[in-house]
Image: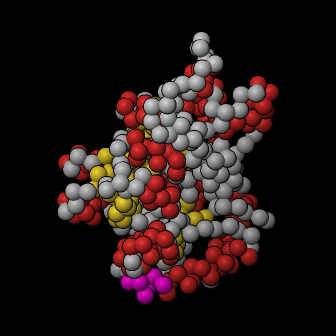
Amino acid sequence: MNIPITKTIFGECEKVAIVKPLESGWVVQGPNVAEFQEKFSEFTKSKHCHATTSCTTALHLGLEAMGITRGDKVIVPSFTYVASANAVEYTGAEVVFCDIDLETFNINEELLEDLIKNDSSIKALMSVNLFGLCANMPFIMKLAKKYSLKVIEDSACGFDGWIGNKHSGTFGDVGCFSFHPRKSICTGEGGMLITDNDEIASKVSQLKDHGASKSDLQRHNEKGGSLLPDFTMRGYNYRMTDLQGALGVCQMKNLEYIMGGRRLCASWYDEALNEVAELKAPQTPAGYKHGYQSYVCIFTNGEDISSLTKEKIDKINLRRNAFMNTLEEKNIATRQGTHAVHTLSYYKNKNKFKDEDFLMSYAADRLSIALPLYAGMSQEEFSYIISNIKEALN
């Protein structure tokens, strides 16, 4: 048996839909992207949606449209994919890392105010809704209002994650999503920026299209479209193709199966791991709905991790890595959750960071483990995973 870390759910709808742009000849951003944006807007209850080439480019667009530039600083959790920090650097601004809460893997909001109140250069917060679980957005928005800060939500993993009746990405000024194959819905590559702010939406519309005052689709649908539009700002080519848009439309139509299947699989893990002391299952606070882009546990080796040191983390890390290697030998794919960005060579060398500077992020990097999760996982596949987990631990 061969168990991947995840599976994209493509069916007949996607096979048919992706051929239509080829037949029509309209393969750049066009009617399929427009429909995808409309469906995404309806689902997330957001006013404006802009499809992009990736979540990374969506983050870049959002930061620039909010006015973040050289000389500014943006707070980013230190446990996230490197793209979160990179997007800040694209603007010329400086990343200020903040440690996380190991219970949720999200930014530790108790540390934020001390960072903000002593540095007037901090202009924005980037909250990351990691693995499908929203950060404490009500608190973060209250803090942002107090200090007049912009908020951008990195919801690359946040699709179908909720606090009450508000979808991830709809709390801040901007929310950004990914449709990479590791994510719940997939368009190959691709991203989406959402906002309720008309001015930001207008800027993003131009910025993603070289700075053009009109899109190709607008020119195509009106008289005088043979003339090129004006370019009123320096922009980028961050447009999603209509081939990807066609996939996105079908993925949105199949949400009940995709997301229902992921949550069912997560519930199986919740029950099965109750009796596995070495793995601490992901937590979901009251009032939150987890999107389960990944099912990420903390490998504790059965030890008390309420107080961690770098030495203890490094010791348990060796056992985690051996455990992951054993599962790999059984053709069960696992991954560390993501990385502590301050430990990556570029950021570490640039800022002279030590691993223990953001200790909980370091712990999450060294002790997290993502288990296989996808809609349609069979009971036979799941039983194979659990039996091999228990065997590897024993």
Q: Residue at x 56, y 57 (%)?
A: 294
Tell me, yes or no, whether the highlighted magenta stretch contains residue 81.
no
Q: Position of residue 100 (x, y in %)?
A: 37, 65
Q: Residue at x 34, y 63 (%)?
A: 96
Q: Residue at x 51, y 68 (%)?
A: 339
Colouring used for the render: secondary structure
The region drawn magenta spans 309-314
Location of residue 221 with respect to 43 vertically, above or below: above
Q: Position of residue 274 (x, y in %)?
A: 52, 67
Q: Residue at x 63, y 75 (%)?
A: 324
Query: Is residue 11 shown left or right of residue 311?
Result: right
Q: Position of residue 42 (x, y in %)?
A: 50, 29
Asked whether residue 19 appears in the rendered view, the answer is yes
Q: Nearer the viewer, residue 289 or 370?
A: 370
Query: Is residue 383 shown left or right of residue 112?
Result: right
Main SS class of the magenta portion in the image: helix
